[in-house]
Image: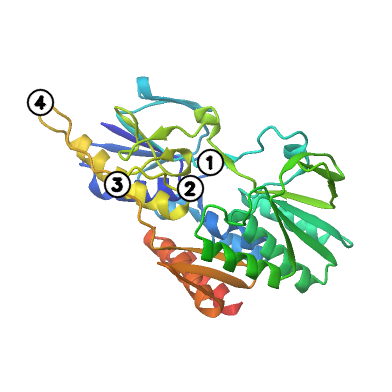
Amino acid sequence: MQVAVLGAGYAGLTLARKLERSLPDDATLVVVERTGEHLVQHELHRVVRRPSLADDIVVPLDEVLNCEIREARVESVAPAENRVSLDDGELAYDYAAVCLGAETAFYDLPGVEEHATPLKRLDHAREIRDDFTALDGGRVVVGGAGLSGVQVAGELAALAREEAVDAEIVLLEQFAEVAPEFPANFREAVRSELEARDVEVRTGTAVERADGNEIALADGSALAYDQFVWTGGIRGPDALGGDRPRVDSTLRLGDGTFVVGDAARVVDGDGESVPASAQAAVREARVVAKNIARLVEGGDDVFDPRLDQFTFDSPGWLVSVGDGAVAQIGPTVVTGTAAKALKATVGVRYLSSVGAVRNAVELIGEELGE
């Protein structure tokens, strides 16, 4: 019996660690991750301002997993055949979870992918920093005011103060509010934190196209820029044709295949759409780990075992904005020191939960040093 976990982001790593403890001895587990490492994605924006954090937020998989780790790129998944095509061959499985995360969506906007830098990998964070520190005055435009856009705009504003870069930071959002998918009091607090740090926020402003010098907006105006960062949305992984398949609360794509985390559009047991987020991915992975272990152990001769249903109930939300942060716990929104402490605690707790204790210790040292 072979079980495959494709990808080792939040969903993949959490799932693999759970399966290592719950699969029977006669089952084999393989994790496919092209980098051989896990990246703590929610801290990536901070590398723009604190390059030394890169080592703290990268976890070698062989330090936290005991199963087979295959460093290969997933090219395609065939759920009907229980087969995966990799860049170095093929992999057959009895059960698998697609945990490949999401890629940046550029929505076929002419020139945007060519001229803007996304923020999905360490190289992106380093490129954003290098381009910014090379500026001799000018305007930086961040397209998309979801949490990633808010965080990178906040880091750039803080970096401008620290490095005495005379830069104007502009954050664009096509909807009427920043962080548009979140509660009103959280959105309002986020916008206040941005504006307190001299980030110019332009909502109701959609990008139509870009060239090497300016961005054309939907209202017919143009915005000149010296640096362009794009955090305007997500699409599915290439291995799924760029789609994020819709799955129900079992997260099952086929009889033997599950999709977990940002790679899917999940409708939970209450019929609610689940937001693409780290906390959702981790919680989904816990449910899928139980279900895969149950399927591997087998049901009776007629029916598969009954599978658990995933229901998402978030305890709150956190976002950093430069040296500040905004946290929502239940209906209450907090900022300042309390929010920053919560943000640091969440990162350290997550790293500890996946066995990356050294990284957790070093991250809290950076936080306290800061």
Disc 4/disc 1 C-alpha distance (Å)? 38 Å
Please indicate whether residue 207 sits to the left or right of residue 254 in the image: right
**Which mark, residue 301?**
4
Pointers 3 and 1 in contact (CB under 8 A)?
A: no
Q: Check disc 1 and give the amino acid type.
A: Ala
Pointers 1 and 2 in contact (CB under 8 A)?
A: yes
Pointers 4 and 3 in contact (CB under 8 A)?
A: no
**Which mark, residue 102?**
1
**Which mark, residue 287?**
3
Q: Residue at x 52, y 31 (%)?
A: 243
Mark found first going from the N terminus, 4 or 2: 2
Disc 2/disc 3 C-alpha distance (Å)? 16 Å
Task: Name above or below for residue 281 compared with residue 94.
Answer: below
Mark found first going from the N terminus, 3 or 1: 1
Please indicate whether residue 226 sits to the left or right of residue 117 in the image: right
Rendered location of residue 76, percent (x, y): 49, 26
